[in-house]
Each structure stands twice: as structure tokens, then as C-alpha cells.
Amino acid sequence: MIQRDQNDRTKALIKNFKNSPKRFYGYMRKLQTVNVAVSQLTVKDGSRVTSTDEEAAQVLCDYFQQVFTREENEQEFNSTTNTSNIEHYLSRSNWR
């Protein structure tokens, strides 16, 4: 009985595809199964590939730490909460 209802719904969606494409594509998207996983990554020296998610996470972490740099006054600026502290910070920098 449930299988028959599912088949009827699928047939109705296909039949009314031109009238309601959003509904059809929503149904198709629900049917898709996408396995999102990090594939094997080569370590920095190129000697081997990662075998676990933890190793892959560490390789990505190391890479992004090399690519992105932390500004000298970033921590100081993030810790300021009131306007006078922000104005003090801006007066010391090249923003004005």
C-alpha cells in the first residue's frame, strides 16, 4: 500500500513536471545520495597519503596555517568592545 502511494506520487510528479519543475527537482534532490568525504590527501613532503580523517584534517590545518597569516594587532582589535578603545586602535594605525 505504501509502495503504491509512492509510485502514484512519483508518476504525478513526472506527469506535472512542466507545471511544477521546482517540486520535481526537489523530489529528485531528495532521492540523490551524495557521500561527502575528504579524499586521500598527500602530506607536505609527498612521501605518503593520508589514511584517516584525522590525518586529512591535520594536513588541511597545516596547509591553511601556512597560507593565512595573523595580523600583529588582530588580537588587540578583537578584544576591544567600546568605541574609545576602537578609536585608540585606529589612531595608532594607518586608518585615519
Image (tube, helix red, strand yellow):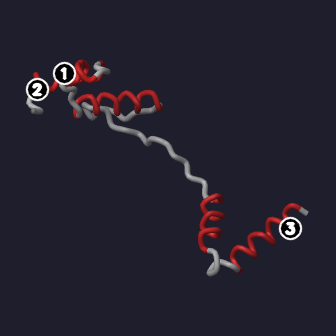
Q: Residue at x 63, y 64 (%)?
A: 28
Q: Identify the residue position indicated by label 3 in the image.
A: 4
Q: How far, Cα to Cα, is label 1 from label 2?
A: 9 Å
Residue 91 picture location, percent across and down: 11, 24
Q: Identify the residue position indicated by label 2 in the image.
A: 93
Q: Residue at x 70, y 73 (%)?
A: 13
Quarter assignment of residue 3: bottom right
- Disc ID at residue 29: none
Dot 2 falls on a residue whose secondary structure is loop
Q: Residues within 10 Å of mark 1 (few under 14, many from 20)?
A: few
Q: Is residue 78 left or right of residue 38?
A: left
* Amino acid bearing label 1: Asn
Q: Nearer the viewer, mark 3 or mark 2?
A: 2
Q: Residues within 10 Å of mark 2 (few under 14, many from 20)?
A: few
Dot 3 falls on a residue whose secondary structure is helix
Q: Quadrant of the N terminus?
A: bottom right
**Which sits earlier in the primary sequence, circle 1 or circle 3?**
3
> Camera-side residue: 43 or 31?
31
> Camera-side residue: 72 or 2?
72
Q: Is residue 42 left or right of residue 72?
A: right
> Camera-side residue: 20 or 40?
20
* Amino acid bearing label 3: Arg
Find out whether the residues at labels 1 and 2 contact each other: C-beta distance under 8 Å.
yes
* Amino acid bearing label 2: Ser
Q: Is residue 16 above or below residue 65?
A: below
Quarter assignment of residue 39: top left
Q: Is residue 75 left or right of residue 23?
A: left
Find out whether the residues at labels 1 and 3 contact each other: C-beta distance under 8 Å.
no
Residue 34 picture location, percent across and down: 56, 52
Residue 31 picture location, percent across and down: 65, 59
Q: Identify the residue position indicated by label 1 in the image.
A: 73
